[in-house]
Amino acid sequence: MSLPVEPVRPNSVSLSRDAPIDRQSIQSGNFPEWELQVQLFDQEFADSFDFDILDPTKIIPEEILPPQPVGRLVLDRMPDNFFAETEQVAFMTQNVPPGIDFSNDPLLQGRNFSYLDTQLKCLGGPNFTHLPISAPKCPFANFQQDGHMAMRNPVGRANYQPNSFGEGPRESPVQGYRHFPAEEQGPKVRLRPESFADHYSQARQFFISQTPPEQRHIVAALIFELSKVQTPAIREQMVSHLMNVDESVASKVAHGLGFNSMPKPADAAMPTRQDLEPSVRPSKALPAARLAAPYGLKLAFFQVHNPH
């Protein structure tokens, strides 16, 4: 099964108590709290969904696939030292617990390679996992040693496996990492699938799922940001893309930018679908909101060995 991890942002979930997220409220024990939810689905669902679930620009509306709560996130303290506890955090998507594998999500695959390179450059060397804020809190075993600013090193004569000395950890076929046994068909090629080509349909669905005040806010935001673009041709290109999303949005943005005439719609690889209904499942914290899922943060799609 695939697992999109979606920590929901403060403006889309109910806080445990109506408290501002600031240092004073946290220090007084009035901790803001979020519910952590995931959307779980199998390959049959992925094959039947309107869009390619591996397209990182797409979401799955919550009324189609209700999120399942798995825990809560509580902001119970502020960093004591911003640099040591925030700037030195080394997030690594390739660090996964047993039972989790990597899907073919292109965004995830790119991060699996780039995040290590990022930490090597930002934190000065390979031993960033020795920093307290980035060190594992559970028992672990590997052969990493030496290098710049190493704070601990394994003892013994061999830091490889297998070896003739009987030293060091050994790979566990039961508890260690295992690939998800996916069955693949067809040729393996380097290209973007045609299923990624629908760039406008879900953008339209997102807009029509908003309440009128939210729609006005989106239009105002587009006008505000595009008004800072100095090249007229780029403004026109953006409005031409909006023509494929919603003509009323494009018209209002064009009027706000002072256009004398409307540009023609941008060339679309696939026509915009008009049959997608508005997402109607309301958000807990925003009763008027019509589309709860976009307020979440889709991190990546992982493979789950055993959904139970």
Image: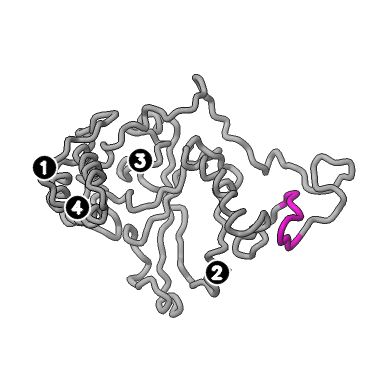
Residue drawn 19% across and 34% down? 274
Residue drawn 40% across and 68% down? 32
User: Tag 1's secondary structure?
Assistant: loop
Q: Earlier in the sequence, mark 2 or mark 4?
A: 2
Tell me the residue that label 4 is attached to: 219
- Where is residue 135 shown, x and y percent of the image? 64, 60
Tell me the residue that label 1 is attached to: 261
Q: Is residue 214 visible?
A: no
Tell me the residue that label 3 is attached to: 58
Q: How is the image coloured?
A: one colour
Q: Amino acid at mark 4?
A: Val
Left or right: residue 43 versus residue 258 is: right
Q: What's the magenta region?
A: 141-152
> In the current view of this chain or complex, which residue is farthest to the right?
165
User: Tag 3's secondary structure?
Assistant: loop
Q: Amino acid at mark 1?
A: Ser
